[in-house]
Amino acid sequence: MPAYLEAFGLIASLLLLITLVMRGMNLLIAAPLCALLLAVISGMPLFPQLVEEGDPNFVGTYMDGFTDFVASWFLMFLLGAIFGKVMEDTRAAEAVSKYLMDKLGPRFTLASVVGACAILTYGGVSLFIVGFTVFPIALALWRMSDYPRRFIPATLAFGSVTFTMTSAGSPEIQNWIPIDHLGTSPLAGWEVSLIVAVVMIATGYYWLKWMVKRAVARGERFDEREGDPVLVDRDTPNPYLSLIPLAVVLGLSLSLHHHFGTSALIIALTGGVLTAYLLGRRFVKDIWETAGSGTTGALLAIANTAAVVGFGWIARDTEGFQAALSFMMEVGGETTPLVGAALSVLVIVGLTGSSSGGMNIVLPEIGPNYIGQGVDPSALHRVAALSSGALDSLPHGGYTVTNIRIICGETHKAAYPAAFATTVAVPLLGAVVAVLLFSVGL
């Protein structure tokens, strides 16, 4: 098939996926539908019965990608969602968020919300739980500061899916997926990671602050809406005690990694669940109901991610994608291979709208090649993780849709420009800085 037709198939299927998701279609329907379009345009046989065993076909390849991701990461998603739900129901997440709000106040509205999201995310709480927990607090601060509420999604996302999600030491799976493929640790490239995090925090925060101030200067104000959640003044646990479960997750994941690899994350999240429950059990009516609610959230999250991973596997098996991947690896060449690695991760993550799903697809393809060239696995780990946190926040990204539409009740038209700045442009800058720092030998 001509290369231009392959390229057209990739672009058309991606644009259709973005359009369908932005119009509200469920990812579990949109992703396989767009994967089918890509398979047809690429001339891929539809059923396993039409090919030799092991050869690419739409049904087999799509479901292999879907099930492979679920098999590898289901327990992490499950325990992460339960941990987040326990932190929510024991009011520990609320206590940490309120403490920051009380200490910083309306004068530091943006810093309060970003800080609360960052602490919870770096402590291992699910991104979606963080959003639902912090949103009512953010809304109260926005009301007091009279800020345009369309900037809340960008602020929540900046604290959740940028400098914390992909930094060294983070228990989020975006920092753990490269471990199995590259033989590294969750602290890989921590020196560069620390510098990049500072750059991302400073750039994103002041950019966000500038956008809000400019909107206020134009006359935009906070608008009350019917059904807005009200921040209830209720009893919460001690905020310092509420930080202990987060510390347990971080401590166990980092200390046990050398003995258990990625399974250390299972132990760490289990420890976090038990610690959070023991410290806040007086607030929990039924622990099994809490766990069941977390399980439902985990199933939805991993199913949505696996759905776009299946789309990515179809894309991976097209000649157009393989040609594009080869081209990007050649861009870096032997002198700057990290550039090729970053570009490869960016493209597949952009196709799938999932940082975790994209890395699971591309790292087995590029990891052995680059390590064989003598690339430092720790540098490759950190560049891949940082790059994965950029184009995963395109309009069709699962977290982006949930954050803007479900958590905050905004539209893409109103909220996405600011979200693009904080969750796409800033992480892209971070990836560039990381490549430069590793290239000069830091």
Image (cartoon, rainbow, N blue to C red):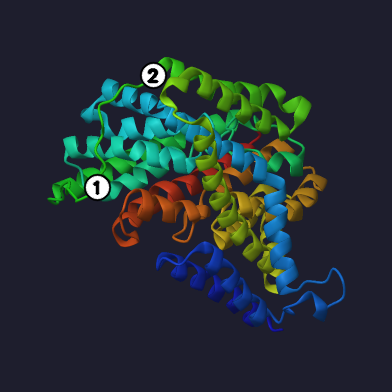
Q: Earlier in the sequence, mark 2 or mark 1?
A: 1
Which residue lies at the image location 19% right of the left edge and 50% below the top edge?
Answer: 225
Which amino acid lies under the numbered mark 1 shown in the image of this protein?
A: Arg
Q: Who's the residue at 60% across and 41% down the image? A: 78
Write down the residue under mark 1: 149
Q: In front here: 34 or 294?
A: 294
Residue name at image x 33 percent, y 22 percent: 99
- Quick one: which residue is furthest to the left in this view? 219
Task: Name the residue furthest right.
Answer: 52
Quadrant hosting residue 344: bottom right
Left or right of residue 442: residue 277? left
Q: Residue 438: where, in percent of width, then height?
A: 63, 38
Which label sits on residue 182? none
Closer to the camera, 236 or 43? 236
Q: Residues within 10 Å of mark 2 (few under 14, many from 20)?
A: some
Above or below residue 155? Residue 369 is below
Q: Is residue 152 above or below residue 10?
A: above
Mark toward the viewer: 2 or 1: 2
The residue type indicated by label 2 comes to Pro
| Residue 156 occupies quadrant | top left
Q: Is residue 378 left or right of residue 217?
A: right
Q: Position of residue 69 (x, y in %)?
A: 68, 52
Instruction: Give yes or no for contact between labels 2 and 1 (Cβ–Cβ under 8 Å).
Output: no
Residue 386 locus on image (x, y percent): 57, 43
SS at mark 2 in the image: loop
Residue 237 numbered mark, or none: 2
Above or below residue 46? Residue 385 is: above
Q: Quadrant of the N terminus?
A: bottom right
Whether residue 240 is situated above or below residue 45 in the rendered picture: above
